[in-house]
Image: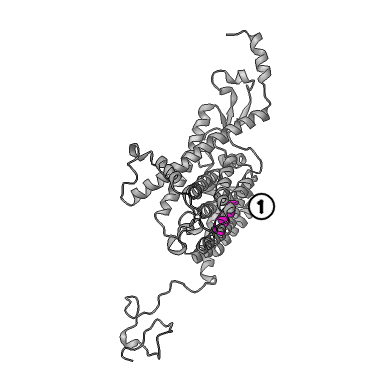
Amino acid sequence: MPPLSMTAPLVAATSLSPTMIQVIASVIVILVMLHVILGGCAYCIMLERKLSAWMQDRVGPNRVGPKGLLQPIADGLKFIMKEDYNPRGVETFLFVLAPGIIMIPAMIAFVIIPWAGVLQLSSLPWGLAQTLGVEGMTVKLTGADVNVGLIYLIAAASLGVYGVALGGWASNSKYSFLGGLRASAQMISYEIPMGLSLLAIVLVAGTVEPYGIISEQSENGWNLLHQPLAAIIFYSCMLAEANRAPFDLAEAESELVGGYHTEYSSMKFALFFLGEYFHMITGAAFFTLLFLGGFSVNPLPFGPDLPTEGGLGLILLQWLVVLAKVTILISFAMAIRWTLPRFRFDQLMRLAWEGMIPASLLVVSMSALFVYMGWTAWTWAGSIACVAIIYMVWPYLPRQPNPNRRLALIGSRFSPLRDGDSIAVESTEFADSPVPPTRGA
């Protein structure tokens, strides 16, 4: 071991400012989590296939590798080997650019997520802290420690709508164009209640900094308990933003052939597919940050919880807690897909504009009132009051005609009409009436 006189210049030469140490740690977190999420996208596809098989009493993929664990690699090779076909008449540049515009916002949005707490660099093994001259310093385990983190994530995630619109328009197909318009309208519409439910959390927390929101939940309890209605609205909008069932009009083959990605094949289609799962992973991590306390394990405002700052062992435990919450939320989204049928487009838009947007406005108003009155510890009671108000007002709201009303058709077991109730018409060639003419007329 060299004497101290030889190691002192090394320590002095490698001493870094706290800002540079945080930048280096953030770059490492970004590189690690980018690869973790990319691998997670591949195995989320397998998880969905396994969960759907279990729910439908099937086996699922089990041939490639032990227990089918290499199936995502086979799927990736299949996409790479498929023919990369561009239909005639497409806007080539925009046609190729659209999948990237969907994928890139999802890949840059996750950087503000706190994947763990604050690491004490003195706990680094093999004397690295002394060698690097960082003893006593701390770093936050996030890709970008910015004080407007929530605003950045919402802004970055909302850019994905441009890829949807471009993909539908540049395909030179009426079906893709209509699918792009529908999916764009859906994503824009559901961003409004998502932003309003997020605003309710920001009002109570008093900050848009991610670590500040986690600290507020560690002290006062998870927002899932305080604002359950906002959590339901946010989670539903998260599914709509990722084009997940029951909001998956992009895959409504019976109505749209295949939506905005009808004309895509090979890896360009795979990027659309991966973008959906990347958005879902980022959205689940965002929901964990806002409503599940991040790396906190105690949902109540009292009792023991994991400390925010500690050594490598604590940081690893916090990281596993966040990943476990994200996995549970993703699995729940997959269970919803294989449980609920998709909405029609009119039902989907009516749910956003006549249901979620008024409800989220009510939640924001309640949160603002409770913050002004200093009743933030009782916001759960405000959520119950919001549900009661919706229940009381709902019967008096104006309604549109029921599009699912049953038509009176002879021969239908739901129809009260009989043969004797039929009426005579002069001609049935252009008749719109569901009632046929009298027999023998």
Q: Amino acid at mark 1?
A: Tyr
Rendered-image quadrant of the C terminus: bottom left
Coordinates of residue 146 in the picture (x, y in percent): 65, 40
Quarter location, residue 219: top right
Give the percent coordinates (x, y) of residue 306: 52, 33
Binning the other alpha carbons within 10 Å of mark 1 as few (below 14), some (14 to 19) or many (20 upward) gives few
In this rendering, the count of numbered labels is: 1
The residue that appears at 51% across and 37% down in the rendered structure is 35
Q: What secondary structure predominates along the stretch shown in magenta?
A: helix
Per the rendered image, the range of residues in magenta is: 158-169
175 shown above or below 418: above
Left of 245 or right of it: where is 369? Answer: right
Horizontally, is 369 left or right of 441 in the view?
right
Query: Taking 39 as reference, is 362 above or below it?
Result: below
Residue at (55%, 47%) from the top-left corner? Answer: 103
> What is the x, y in percent for residue 80?
45, 44
Q: Nearer the viewer, residue 261 or 352?
A: 261
195 versus 298 height, above or below: below
- The percent coordinates of residue 273 (x first, y second) are 48, 49
The quadrant the N terminus occupies is: top right
Q: Nearer the viewer, residue 319 or 407?
A: 407
Residue under circle 1?
372
> Is 57 on the left or on the right of 277, as rendered?
left
Nearer to us in this view, 80 or 25? 80
Task: Determine if residue 133 is in view.
Answer: yes
